[in-house]
Amino acid sequence: MRVERIAYLISFLLTFFIIVYVIITVIGIPRPLEYIQPTPPIPSKNLTIVIGNTVLLPPPRKMTNISVEEAILLRRSIREYTEDPIPIDHLSMILWAAYGITETRWGLRAAPSAGATYPLEIYVVIGRNGVSIGSEFLDAGVYKYDPHRHILTLVKSGDVREELYVAALRQEWVRNAPVNIVIFAVFERTTRVYGYRGEVRYVPMEVGHVGQNIYLIATALGYGCVVIGAFYDDEVSRVIGAQRDEVPMYIVPIGVPKHPYRVSFEDIERYIESMRG
């Protein structure tokens, strides 16, 4: 009788494990928590040429293995950065993704624009040793981005981050980031077509589009950034050396995050399930 019970128990356990195996194989089980963390890719062969006050940026190319879904998942406002510089290849990609040319017949850009009026101007504040070109560094200063030629033109020499920090209500991340992108708007380009609606709706919307582009490409490249709208307009314009018809809209500090944000799609799935009850 005891032998029969043991045989029955063994048979039962074998049947149980077979059933469990089939369920796992067919249905699957949740994967262990896997945090997605983008890693900055290896920069391409240096194609940057500096001629006087002009920086010929490396042409845009595919640089990351991060999907759109992962970039959206990981996008956060990051305010603490290491002292690591941003390679010129990566700065080139960030500027192109922000407002660069993505269509060659009409010169359309990476961000949608009402009537393709493109009212925005992009300035880049580069700190001392903030952008690397191989084993060297791009001179600190304020540069203006030309999307059609994909170049930077020096507007003002020297590290102006301290002045920009003061103009931005002393927000530390402005002073600490190796690079700040400052977005200005020339409202008349859009308002002459759309009037008041362009001023209160279309231009601010376009600034938001560009800001999100910067967030996503920075995330995909392994950087952190934050968009800032709190600053003294006149002081920012003075620090940058902007034109009289250019109105400051955003300051975007960018750098390698001290504390990278980590999350997984499994985390989001569990959150949704908990909210559904």
Image (tube, rainbow, N blue to C red):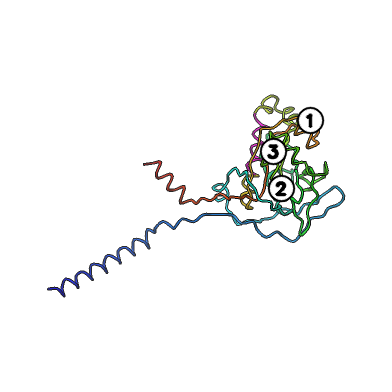
Mark 1: few/some/many CA within 10 Å (<14, 14-19, 20+): few
Tell which circle, 2 or 3, labels the residue nearer the N-terminal end: 2
Figure check: 85 above or below 78: below
Image coordinates of residue 268 in percent, x first then y, are 46, 47
- Magenta-drawn stretch, dominant element (helix, strand or loop): helix
Residue placed furthest toward the bottom: 3
Amino acid, disc 1: Asp
**Which SS class for mark 3?**
strand
Q: Quadrant of residue 10?
A: bottom left
**Which SS class for mark 1?**
loop
Residue 245 - label: 1
The answer to whether marks 1 and 2 mark residues whose Cβ atoms lie closer than 8 Å is no
User: What is the distance, in whole Å, between disc 1 and disc 2 at their CAs?
Assistant: 27 Å
State which quarter of the image contains the N terminus: bottom left
In this rendering, the count of numbered labels is 3
Amino acid, disc 3: Ile
Tell which circle, 1 or 3, labels the residue nearer the N-terminal end: 1
Q: Residue at x 80, y 51 (%)?
A: 56
Q: Determine which residue is flagged by label 3.
A: 251
Q: Determine which residue is flagged by label 2.
A: 178
Q: Quadrant of residue 245?
A: top right
Amino acid, disc 2: Pro
**Which SS class for mark 2?**
loop
- Residue 202 is covered by the magenta coloring: yes
Mark 1 vs mark 3: in front: 3
Q: Which residues are magenta?
A: 201-213
State which quarter of the image contains the C terminus: top left
Image coordinates of residue 183 in percent, x first then y, are 72, 38
